[in-house]
Image (cartoon, coloured by chain):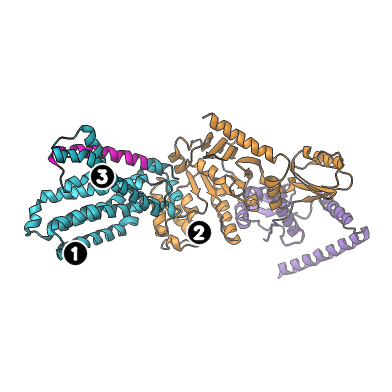
């Protein structure tokens, strides 16, 4: 499982990890049922405080993206992609809000923004297809 | 409430006429990883030496696991693992010999654990200490600090001089060997980007006083810089949470900590037009705390000198 | 907690001890064999000059290298009382002086068993001479390593040693003329104060090698004064060591 921490970003480390795991779940790199590394292992791998990883796992559990099976460990939730619609929209809306602020500052019009959105969707769909293909081989 | 593994109260230390520490207050919860951040010469090593009883305080006190190093330094040293800054060890000894030598001082030395650590840290008992690379030297120093299974480990700038890969490896060992065994770790550094991912809390020491204590995961979000054109009557020095004010032509850059909506409103009221808000990277955050000009830097230094003079007058 | 310290100091000093012993024995043997001067003179030179030089050299390498090598902090941060470390270091430095001197005394005794000159000295005299030489060397060694400034390097300690020697010589000249001259000239017993003033100088250990005028009485008083001086100097040295972290 690949996670990269951006040292010069304003985003706190735990949120960066949460976002990256969410992204990997959304693109199918992390499939439902796949076992996550233990808190200690992931903390060691990233050289990050264990409490930070604990916070990450707790948050993802609360959002029902991860589930804990006592004794066996933490797994990607079976229904990981089926969050309640409202919750999902809420998350995306927040991110879009930040994007729009930036767009206004940088003088990018609403239409240009739509174009960029479409391009992003295409890219992710492509990735997901590739991920599934590799998975079945 | 978790008891403090290390408690420092109004600790002062002077070296001749020079005031090194002017009243340090600090509380390290048991089992936590605590980062002690400060520029070179800010007093970090002095504080650590006071914790080990290598120096006696001019005023104030400190305790390590309820033991007072000024009263019983031997008891503190027996129960604590310590790694000095740029630790020089006996070059003529071999790794195996120096391990045996250090073991002779600690009744609770665990040979089996040390054997495992020697393998894990990639050290060979036959190598002479003077032939070790800097990275190996640091790992050996860490091993020697852990052999008697201390509950508290004090590391003074442990990654000094290490390349980025060795540095990350070292911090990895701190997390997997120490944090996962609930060992309290107190380590000093002058690099915030090294402390931030690893520590639960950080305290910033500057000119012998603590200027900031807080949780590391809030640092990135809480410090913000605002660039705007100020109103002519705006009193910027009074802004709450102010760390730094810099003027340029007709605009001003203001750095604020613990940024919230109330503070943002205050900025809005002080500005004539649009405000540009940016986040800062960790080096900039550290700079803002330590050399940021908030008009009170001179006052703070004067306070330090006053307190130290008071302390020495009370002796 | 003393045995790791003993082991370390032994390992650090053992080659110096071997070298010192070899050198001094070699010189002793050479002087005796070459018959450059009488055996008695050789004994005096070895016990006095050899002892002083050994003492100076050893004192330079007792406390100062720990700081010079940067290992002071590593040692001081161990859970062992500073006085124990101080005592062990002093001991091994002293062995570096006493070892060679005793080896040479042995050579002096064994070298010419049939020679009337040596036998003329008598075993008792040889032992007295060795004690005198060792007493002087011990005091000089202790004064040099204990009175040097806290953060002195090896060379600085050597300089202190030379200054101590010069001071002792000057003191001997002054005290000698004040106290000893009347005794030798008029056969008068010196006052108590006079005796103490003289005996406080370690050079009086030479009285064991070449005895003083009988009016000075038994050497017991001299030994007592020297012991007091020793304790005082060691106390000063220990305080400096404890503060030099």
Which residue of the protein is positioned furthest toward the bottom in this rendering?
A137
Range of residues picked out in magenta: C212-237
Q: Are marks 2 and 1 in contact (CB under 8 Å)?
A: no
Horizontal and vertical percent position of residue B288: 71, 47
- Residue B163 drawn in magenta: no
Q: Nearer the viewer, residue C194 or A72?
A: C194
| Chain of the residue under the numbered disc 3 shown in the image | C
Which secondary structure is most common in the magenta stretch? helix
Residue ID at (81%, 41%):
B261
The residue drawn where x is 44% and y is 56% is B115
Estimate how packed mark 3 is, as few (under 14), some (14 to 19) or many (20 or more) residues with alpha carbons within 10 Å: few
Q: Chain of mark 2?
A: B
Residue bearing mark 2: B121
Q: Nearer the viewer, mark 2 or mark 1?
A: 1
The color chain B is rendered in = orange
Q: Nearer the viewer, mark 3 or mark 2?
A: 3
| Placement of A9 over or under C200, stated as above or below | below
- Please give the count of numbered marks on the rendered protein: 3
Pointer 3 residue: C173
Mark identifier at residue C30: 1
Q: Measure the C-alpha gap from mark 2 to mark 1.
A: 55 Å
**Chain C drawn in what color?**
cyan
Do marks 3 and 2 both belong to one polypeptide chain?
Answer: no
State the image coordinates of residue A20 (x, y, percent, origin top left).
Answer: 73, 57
Q: Is residue C232 magenta?
A: yes
| Residue B309 versus residue C71 in the image, above or below | above
């Amino acid at each position: 499982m690949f996670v990269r921490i951006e040292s010069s970003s304003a985003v706190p480390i735990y949120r960066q990890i949460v976002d990256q795991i969410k992204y990997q779940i959304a693109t199918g790199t992390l499939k439902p049922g796949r076992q996550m590394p233990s808190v200690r292992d992931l903390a060691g791998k990233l050289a990050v405080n264990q409490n930070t990883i604990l916070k990450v796992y707790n948050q993802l559990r609360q959002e029902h993206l991860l589930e804990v099976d006592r004794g066996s460990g933490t797994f990607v939730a079976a229904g990981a992609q089926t969050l309640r619609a409202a919750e999902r929209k809420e998350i995306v809306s927040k991110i879009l809000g930040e994007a729009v602020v930036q767009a206004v500052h940088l003088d990018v019009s609403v239409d240009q923004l739509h174009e960029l959105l479409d391009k992003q969707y295409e890219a992710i769909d492509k990735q997901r297809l590739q991920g599934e293909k590799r998975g079945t081989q | 409430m978790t008891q403090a593994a290390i408690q420092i109260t109004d600790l002062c230390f002077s070296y001749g006429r020079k005031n090194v520490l002017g009243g340090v207050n600090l509380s390290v919860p048991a089992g936590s990883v605590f980062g002690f951040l400060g520029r070179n010469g800010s007093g970090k090593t002095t504080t650590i030496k006071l914790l080990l009883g290598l120096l006696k305080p001019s005023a104030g006190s400190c305790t390590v696991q309820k033991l007072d190093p000024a009263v019983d330094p031997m008891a503190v040293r027996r129960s604590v693992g310590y790694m000095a800054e740029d630790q020089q060890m006996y070059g003529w000894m071999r790794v195996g010999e120096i391990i045996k030598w250090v073991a002779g001082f600690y009744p609770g030395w665990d040979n089996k654990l040390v054997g495992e650590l020697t393998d894990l840290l990639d050290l060979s008992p036959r190598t002479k200490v003077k032939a070790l690379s800097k990275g190996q030297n640091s790992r050996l120093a860490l091993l020697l600090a852990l052999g008697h299974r201390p509950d508290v480990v004090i590391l003074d700038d442990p990654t000094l001089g290490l390349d980025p890969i060795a540095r990350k490896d070292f911090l990895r060992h701190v997390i997997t060997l120490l944090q996962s065994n609930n060992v309290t770790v107190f380590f000093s550094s002058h690099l915030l980007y090294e402390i931030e991912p690893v520590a639960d809390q950080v305290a910033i020491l500057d000119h012998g006083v603590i200027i900031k204590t807080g949780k590391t995961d809030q640092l990135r979000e809480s410090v913000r810089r605002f660039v705007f054109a100020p109103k002519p009557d705006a009193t910027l020095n009074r802004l709450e949470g102010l760390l730094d004010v810099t003027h340029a032509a007709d605009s001003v850059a203001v750095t604020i900590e613990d940024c919230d909506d109330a503070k943002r409103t205050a900025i809005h009221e002080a500005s004539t037009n649009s405000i540009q808000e940016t986040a800062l990277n960790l080096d900039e955050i550290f700079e803002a705390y330590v050399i940021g000009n908030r008009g009170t830097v001179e006052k703070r230094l004067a306070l330090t000198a006053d307190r130290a003079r008071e302390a020495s007058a009370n002796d | 907690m003393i045995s790791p310290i003993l082991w370390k100091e032994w390992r650090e000093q053992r080659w110096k001890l071997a070298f010192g012993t070899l050198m001094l024995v070699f010189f002793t043997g050479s002087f005796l064999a070459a018959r450059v001067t009488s055996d008695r003179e050789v004994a005096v030179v070895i016990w006095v000059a050899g002892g002083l030089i050994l003492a100076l050299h050893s004192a330079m390498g007792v406390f100062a290298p720990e700081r010079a090598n940067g290992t002071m902090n590593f040692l001081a941060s161990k859970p062992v009382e500073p006085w124990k470390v101080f005592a062990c270091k002093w001991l091994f430095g002293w062995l570096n002086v006493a070892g060679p001197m005793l080896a040479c005394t042995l050579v002096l005794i064994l070298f010419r068993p049939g020679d009337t000159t040596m036998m003329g000295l008598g075993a008792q005299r040889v032992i007295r001479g060795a004690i005198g030489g060792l007493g002087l060397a011990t005091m000089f060694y202790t004064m040099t390593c204990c009175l040097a400034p806290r953060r002195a390097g090896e060379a600085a300690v050597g300089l202190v040693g030379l200054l101590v020697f010069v001071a002792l010589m000057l003191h001997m000249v002054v005290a000698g003329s004040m106290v000893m001259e009347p005794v030798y000239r008029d056969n008068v017993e010196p006052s108590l104060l006079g005796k103490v003033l003289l005996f406080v100088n370690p050079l009086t250990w030479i009285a064991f090698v070449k005895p003083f005028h009988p009016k000075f009485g038994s050497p017991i008083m001299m030994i007592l004064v020297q012991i007091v001086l020793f304790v005082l100097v060691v106390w000063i040295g220990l305080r400096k060591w404890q503060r030099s972290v």
